[in-house]
Image: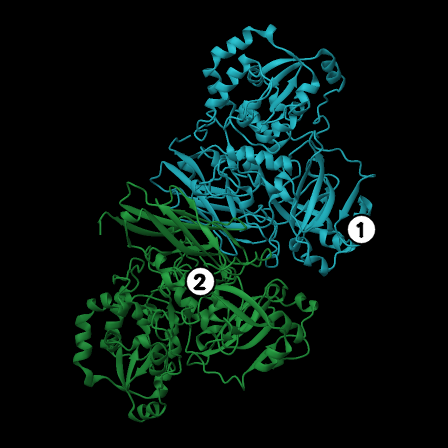
Chain colours: A cyan, B green
């Protein structure tokens, strides 16, 4: 917690020059002061100018955003760096003057107060002034006082020439030869080496950790998404788990902890099946980025998928572990911990409200099956939580531990991420304590076909529009309105809750509509139109509607992007 | 049900000329044919041109909208009627030729097929062609074959000269003298004569039945709304109930019915207290009317109020009446019936989902107290249902009967009213079966001060904006954004859940935030602005947002009006 609080301070005070480090060469100090000083100018207008569909750029950006993923642009750094070229020349021109530091000296510099030093391939760097410009945000402080190599193995995007260029500007010395040898003896293996193979059709937002979404037009072809194309959202390397020795720990209930093997979970508790849609909080973030740069993976519209999940009910397991109504007098939350961890040993974690976990109608699963098969590695093998109606981030994968508690999870992802803010809130003013952790998601829909920029022939005389719609909290989507003229007039789409040609599933009980609806509308092409602006908006059975536009719901993390979805289509008069 | 199905047919086929009645004078038939024929033109552009704040007009309109409240404009009729003046002169010029009918003959005309006849003060009228133009919609068919007097006593707006003028055009004969005498012996007393006194500060939308809202600036002065200014929404006359002989009937559960006196309810069940906001589905309907005429009372922004309610929990009463989990295998709904009834004996009715009624966290009350006092007559004395988080229409007042059932209430208000539709749906295309009955309401907020059109002095240097925010389903409002520039930039308002100067109430458990929040923002006046467009939008803890604009959520009944609320304020440069 201390680290997070510290990091928040950093974020709150933004790009203000930190206090002068204690040990410093004069030339380097000059360079850093210039860089740091100019970093106090306003960052808000910084934009990524790269086209969205350049794969190398997308992957690079996505990688930058991995993990806790704060983003300040490297582009900003380049701009600032140009202003200090003269000084850099000075620094680079005098390598012989740089001092030798011991590892012990480096390790003293682990904070903005004492300076933030790191080593890389035998050189020592004082990156204090760079901390506030780091695209990956406060994660950089985890490396303070030590070697960068293991972190760059975790977040592979750093292995690029321009990143090394930036680093070189902060070089302040060399690491003592014997300490270099010690470092090299700790092999820096790739923590992603055991990640599973993925289907090549996926559109990759980040390779390490792996984050990818299916092409939208494929997504809406199946009511139940095949596991291979189900969107992948990993915060860390995929852990390899031996199912025969796997154990789930259940803590926080009277009578001490409970340990359950995978066999226990399968044989001692009734198997419960739920069809539930999972959606990343950042789904459709790219539309917010188009308004103003936000922090996070640049998801399109397909960070959402639907599957059949089977497993033990969390409720049943907690009852077995000693839950009684008395517990609800002091407990409010159920915390989950994953087996996926970063180089510091910090594991992924999240929590949900206790009443959701214990409700007979909450349908929270400890799932060991997805679409009738054991969970794939990317989806949490051998066990994950499935919290229907709740943001993906709380559906913890590779589950290792459950704790019933008076408090929410203290994890970064619960406390300082995955929360919504006003468009007026920026990184200088954000107070993460002021907003609730996202649990239920708002009503959502998007157009999967035609694609933005598609051309339809006037000879076809009509256009077929397809998409998905879903709402959080078990609220059933009851209507999708589609407009071909940017929202001036509307038509009602056909909804379905099963695959095309299959009979419709029975309506879910009230409050338990966990799965999306796919929708379709075939409408005549307006005779005069040269272009269509196709828009969709869904309504759930609490009659919540999607907001019209993106800008008024823009938020600095780019979450909860659920404005009307719009695609533009050109009508071609070609006879061909 | 048959009547409703029949009425729906009428509505679906709209203003199409009905089949020719069997008995008819030639001249009257001419007149009606002309009126009926032209009534098939498009009604959509008909508007009320009167200013909104003309009290006589507002009351008249409100009266028209009473009860099931369908509205087609009398103005439409006037327009059509002008086209038939020549014919009317013919009819009126020959009163001596009109035949004498017996009550028995009149009574044969009770449908569009057989003609719709009514009597009024001794004359007989064939109103078949007027049915589709009736501002009160299908209710008019209840009077078919009989006297209008008792209905006009129920819906007092009819007692106006222009209504009599319209009626006169449909006169087809005189009622036989002996039948006139029989009618007069059935005294037509005013069913509203026992309605209680109301506070004069209320802005009346309809006198009979009584529908009124408090002035917005008073509404937000109290966190708990005093009963006297709590908005009133009556569908029918207020029934007078003797508490000593009052009995509640509970049906539909194994073991036969249960009857409970008021004393039973107070003494046999724990008293449970809930602070809950009630909102009419039609709150802010006037903003939809400004887009295109809808059917319903022309509510402003104050058809919402907040009170402390106390009573027995519905759950406890149903358990006492024999509820067990087995019941949930076949039952899905809990139906309520009120003691308020129309002249045909039809009582007000509604239902809620069984899981809401039985949930320990649903907090559904059979309330006998409001703000620490016995329920006032207008709010359901001696007993009403309070369904926190659910649209006002399901909070049945003057409760007489509870029925656990596999079916929803068959009442008009559950089946063919209080449902939401696409803006594309009109009275020609609406299918009430296609939409779910409104239960939970979507997130809502409005500005109570300053009022639209207010003037603020530049010398004040700042403006204070106040309002309320609430969401259905127990979802807590977590933020209200306020804009002074029509939505371009936003500021976050201060929320409170208690009266000004009082300590805040503890946060409600998740999913049980039944009460609104009041909010306030004091902001500097923008130096250059001549006018402010103040806008508010609320966010609940499922991060549902209000839609930006009214037109895309417009619906033919004018319900669920929850777009951003906007008021325009002028900045005065006067030194005074």
Q: Name the residue that disc number 2 marks.
A: B281
State the quadrant of the C terminus of chain A.
top left
The reply to the same-chain question for discs 1 and 2 is no
Residue B510 sits in which quadrant?
bottom right
Please rate how many residues cluster around mark 1, counting C-alpha atoms within 10 Å: few if below 14, some from 14 to 19, many from 20: few
Q: Nearer the viewer, residue B514 or A517?
A: B514
Using the image, determine if residue A68 lies above or below residue B57: above
Residue B406 horizontal/vertical position (percent): 61, 68
Residue A129 sits in which quadrant?
top right
Residue A179 horizontal/vertical position (percent): 73, 15
Using the image, determine if residue B255 lies above or below residue A452: below
Q: Chain of mark 1?
A: A
Q: Nearer the viewer, residue B347 or B41?
A: B347
Please rate how many residues cluster around mark 2, counting C-alpha atoms within 10 Å: few if below 14, some from 14 to 19, many from 20: many
Using the image, determine if residue A546 lies above or below residue A74: below
Q: Name the residue that disc number 1 marks.
A: A256
Q: Is residue A28 left or right of residue B423?
A: right
Let me know if residue A297 appears in the view. no
Q: Determine the secondary structure under disc 1.
A: loop
Residue B247 horizontal/vertical position (percent): 56, 82
Q: Nearer the viewer, residue A57 or A11?
A: A11
Q: Chain of mark 2?
A: B
Give the mark count. Answer: 2
């Amino acid at each position: 917690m201390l680290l997070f609080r510290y990091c928040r301070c950093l974020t709150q005070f933004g790009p203000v020059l930190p206090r002068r480090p204690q040990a410093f060469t004069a030339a380097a100090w000059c360079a850093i002061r210039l860089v740091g000083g100019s970093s106090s100018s306003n960052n808000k207008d910084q934009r990524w100018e790269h086209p969205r569909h350049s794969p190398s750029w997308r992957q690079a950006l996505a990688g930058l955003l991995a993990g806790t993923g704060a983003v300040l642009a490297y582009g900003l750094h380049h701009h600032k760096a140009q202003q200090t070229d003269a000084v850099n020349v000075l620094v680079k021109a005098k390598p012989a003057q740089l001092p030798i530091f011991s590892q012990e000296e480096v390790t003293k510099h682990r904070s903005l107060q004492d300076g933030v030093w790191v080593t890389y391939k035998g050189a020592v760097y004082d990156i204090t002034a760079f901390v506030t410009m780091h695209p990956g945000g406060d994660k950089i402080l985890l490396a303070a006082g030590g070697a960068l190599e293991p972190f760059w193995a975790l977040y592979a995007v750093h292995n690029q020439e321009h990143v090394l260029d930036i680093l070189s500007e902060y070089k302040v010395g060399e690491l003592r030869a014997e300490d270099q040898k010690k470092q090299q003896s700790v092999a820096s293996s790739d923590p992603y080496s055991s990640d599973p193979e993925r289907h090549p059709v996926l559109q990759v937002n980040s390779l390490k950790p792996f984050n990818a979404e299916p092409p939208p037009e494929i997504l809406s072809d199946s009511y139940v998404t095949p596991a291979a194309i189900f969107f992948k959202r990993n915060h860390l390397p995929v852990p390899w788990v031996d199912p025969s020795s796997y154990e789930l720990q259940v803590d926080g209930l009277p009578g001490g902890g409970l340990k359950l093997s995978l066999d226990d979970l399968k044989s001692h508790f009734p198997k419960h099946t739920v069809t539930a849609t999972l959606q990343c909080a950042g789904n459709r973030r790219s539309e917010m980025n188009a308004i103003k740069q936000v922090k996070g993976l640049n998801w399109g519209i397909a960070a959402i998928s639907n599957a059949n999940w089977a497993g033990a009910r969390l409720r049943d397991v907690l009852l077995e572990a000693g839950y009684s109504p008395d517990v609800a007098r002091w407990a409010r939350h159920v915390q989950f911990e994953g087996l996926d961890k970063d180089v510091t040993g910090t594991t992924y974690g999240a929590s949900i409200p206790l009443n959701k976990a214990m409700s007979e109608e909450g349908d929270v699963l400890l799932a060991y099956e997805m679409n009738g098969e054991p969970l794939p590695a990317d989806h949490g093998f051998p066990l994950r939580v499935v919290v229907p109606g709740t943001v993906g981030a709380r559906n913890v994968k590779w589950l290792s531990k459950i704790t019933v508690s008076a408090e929410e999870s203290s994890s970064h992802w619960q406390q300082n991420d995955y929360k919504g803010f006003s468009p007026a809130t920026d990184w200088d003013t954000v107070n993460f304590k002021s907003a609730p952790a996202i649990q239920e998601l708002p009503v959502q829909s998007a157009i999967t076909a035609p694609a933005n920029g598609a051309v339809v022939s006037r000879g076809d005389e009509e256009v077929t529009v397809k998409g998905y719609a879903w709402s959080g909290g078990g609220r059933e989507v009851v209507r999708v309105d589609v407009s071909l003229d940017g929202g001036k007039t509307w038509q009602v789409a056909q909804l379905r809750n099963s695959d095309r040609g299959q009979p419709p599933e029975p309506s879910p009980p009230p409050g338990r509509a966990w799965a999306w609806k796919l929708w379709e509308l075939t409408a005549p092409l307006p005779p005069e139109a040269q272009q269509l602006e196709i828009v969709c908006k869904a309504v759930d059975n609490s009659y919540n509607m999607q907001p019209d536009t993106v800008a008024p719901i823009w938020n600095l993390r780019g979450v909860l992007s659920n404005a009307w979805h719009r695609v533009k289509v050109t009508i071609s008069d070609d006879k061909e």
